[in-house]
Image: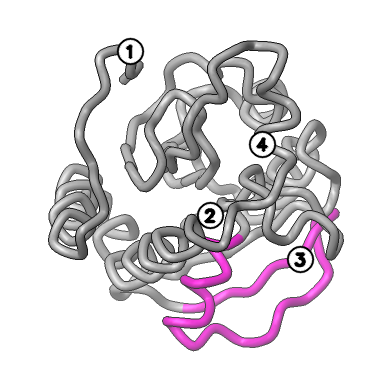
Amino acid sequence: MLLFVGLGNPGSQYVRNRHNIGFMAVEAIASRHNFPPWKRRFQGVTTEGMIGGQRVLLLLPGTFMNESGRAVQEASAFYKIELADTVVLHDEIDLTPAKLRVKTGGGNAGHNGLRSITAHVGNEYRRVRIGVGHPGAKELVHAHVLNDFSKADMEWVHALCDLVAENAELLAKGQDPAFQNKIHLAMVAKGFDDSKEPNEKN
């Protein structure tokens, strides 16, 4: 059993927030792979199905971002899911918009959702980091991630979420570099600039 967690805040007012792109990506996976309807469980909503021959539980915590780890801990404990089989999809301000990177463990870079998960289950889970850009000053970050994507942004958001869903089998099989590379090449082919910025943190 694998656990794919999308990070975000519950409630209609947050649906298009930059902070909710993890929710968007996991919802796209559920739709693409014909998962059954979401059910309320583990302090959030879940749905379960098969991706690439692997049994996968999708989880959207309903605890608000800062307490995401509570939901992840409940689901992990119930199914005895190892950290290596846990994949967290989340917004990343240290990546330029439309860029995606995958890594295991590492720092939480001030991300309260990641900090909560690390506190509850440990740090060595896999992370799908989805770039939403940095507003340029630390004091602007909170407003930046809790503001909606612009209409123009939604073009790359939809494209990227569709590609995450399309290539989720690679994630399920643990082929993270191949997953990252396929999405990078597809986004470039679609005309979304994925150039590296000098201050980008990997």
Q: Mark 4 points at which residue?
A: 145
Q: What's the distance in space between the residues labelled 2 and 4, CA to CA?
A: 25 Å
Q: How is the image coloured?
A: one colour
Instruction: Provide residue 122's location: percent of width, then percent of height.
Output: 59, 23
Q: Is residue 29 left or right of residue 195?
A: right
**Label at residue 3:** 2
Label 2 packing within 10 angstroms: few (<14), some (14-19), many (20+): many
Residue type, label 3: Val
Q: What amino acid type should be assigned to the residue bearing mark 1?
A: Asn
Question: Range of the magenta residues?
Answer: 24-49
Mark found first going from the N terminus, 1 or 2: 2
**Among numbered discs 2 and 4, the one appearing first in the sequence:** 2
Q: Earlier in the sequence, mark 1 or mark 4?
A: 4
Mark 3 residue element: strand
Residue that carries the numbered disc 1 in the rendered image: 199
In the image, residue 201 sits, relative to residue 70, either above or below, namely above
Residue highlighted by disc 3? 45
